[in-house]
Image: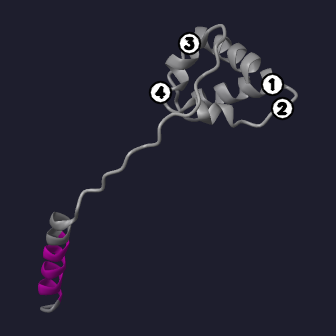
Amino acid sequence: MQRTIPLAITLALAAVVSSALAAPVNYKTPDEVAAFKPGPNLDVVQGNCSACHSSDYIATQPPMKDRKGFWQAEVTKMIKVYGAPIDDADVGKIVDYLAATY
């Protein structure tokens, strides 16, 4: 018991000193290489989707037969699972844009 307290104090001090001496990490995110394609309701998509991810992410989604169904499910997932604050009035606009454009 008597050894435990000095050991705990030593470890705590070592943690404080090492965190104080740690160098900050600097990084630069890569530049955007893709842009949202022009289309109806582009402003709605940019205002809602680009808050969380880039147009690169949207452009890399695989091609599918039921594009509208796929994008409806994706937008619904963003709202229900990830908590995206998308107004009900914007959901159809976003789905229509994505289905027509990607």
Coordinates of residue 45 in the picture (x, y in percent):
58, 17
**Alpha carbon separation for disc pair 1 and 3:** 19 Å
**Alpha carbon separation for disc pair 4 and 1:** 23 Å
| Residue in the foreground of this view, choosing between 33 and 61 | 33
Q: Classify residue 87 by image quadrant.
A: top right
Q: Earlier in the sequence, mark 3 or mark 2?
A: 3
Q: Which residue is mark 2?
A: 64
**Alpha carbon separation for disc pair 1 and 2:** 6 Å
Say whether residue 44 is left or right of residue 11.
right
Say whether residue 43 is left or right of residue 72.
left
Q: Classify residue 81 by image quadrant.
A: top right
Circle 4 crowding by C-alpha within 10 Å: few under 14, some 14–19, many from 20: few
**Alpha carbon separation for disc pair 4 and 2:** 25 Å
Q: Earlier in the sequence, mark 4 or mark 1?
A: 4
**Alpha carbon separation for disc pair 4 and 3:** 11 Å
- Residue 5 part of the magenta segment: yes
Under circle 1, the secondary element is: helix
Under circle 4, the secondary element is: loop
